[in-house]
Image (cartoon, grey):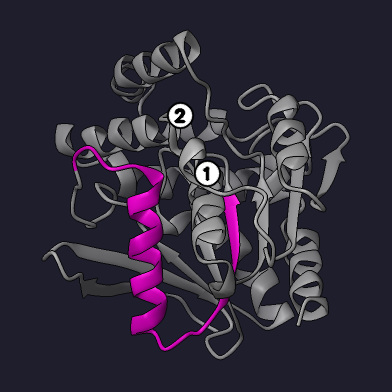
Amino acid sequence: MTSNFSNSTTLADGRVLVWDEWGEPTGVPLLYVHGTPGSGREAQVLHHAAGRLGIRIIAPHRPGYGGSTHLPGRSVLEWAEDAYTLLDQLGLPAAMLLGFSGGGPHAIAFALRYPNRASAVGLIAPAGSPTGVSAVVSRGAWAVGMPVLAGILGLPRLGRRLVARSGSRRRSLRAASIFTASLDTAVGRGREHLRGAVRDSWAIYGPWSRFLNWNQKGLPPFLLWHGEDDTTVKPEVSHRISRALAGSQLTILPGVGHVNALSEHGETILSELKSAAESAR
């Protein structure tokens, strides 16, 4: 059970799409949608759990991250097209999806646009899609704040701060090292990579939700998990998304922060998501 860091493909418009693989290479496919900023290396935190559960994690880097070509002005809808193409090229008719934080809107967009290609969808502390003044503030905060944080704190310190204090020290330190490596892959190569993070955040906080049919029939199961103590993305966001997705299941994790929802509860989340996909067949 090994990981592969060198997968890439060329899309129809000439852009390069890079992805990592984790877990069991011959297992049930899961498309992991990383946070913001982040990269496919983030899914390493689920590597051993996925192996035990027989899950193959396919974790693409979104445009502007980790070798994937920039796509200026993109929305989460363009990423859905990229993911669709990747599944086609891998010969996968469908896959589970798991979106963490900023990956949440991208996972939602894919599943609502191509419900027959998603066997089940998991969302961990998904970021919201504010409108009006709040959208402008969110976009501006990321455009200014991301370069400042990376410059002042440095990536190792920023990675450690992303890991909540709850949970065992060993697991927290391991998660911190993985998230630091993911950040280094995503934004650790100069201003151009920071620009990818800013564009990613603009896509997340853009008006993507209004272009999707949230009430269509035949949607896959949606499962959401959110830490009760999450201060990065408030639990109210998951409550709002769950209400918009009829029949979805929301689990609030007591005493859990943002990153710990993934690092401490990853195996349970993968197990429940796989069960949901099997039940939906």
The boundaries of the magenta stretch are: 72-99
Q: Secondary structure beneath disc 2?
A: helix
Q: CA distance from mark 2 to mark 1?
A: 23 Å
Reading the image, the residue beneath label 1 is 105
> Which quadrant: the C terminus?
bottom right
- The mark that comes first in sequence, 2 or 1, is 1
The image shows residue 90 at horizontal and vertical percentages of: 39, 84
| Residue drawn at the location 70% of the way across and 70% of the way down | 49
Comparing 89 with 268, the one in front is 89
**Camera-nearest residue between 52 and 126:** 126
Task: Specify whether 96 is left or right of 79.
Answer: right
Q: Position of residue 40 (x, y in %)?
A: 42, 58
Q: Which mark is residue 158?
A: 2
Q: Identify the image quadrant of residue 147.
A: top left
Is residue 65 magenta-colored?
no
The answer to whether residue 171 is visible is no
Residue at the outermost right position: 254
Q: Is residue 93 magenta?
A: yes
> Mark 2: which amino acid?
Leu
Viewer-proximal residue among 161 and 69? 69
Q: Is residue 121 above or below residue 100?
A: below
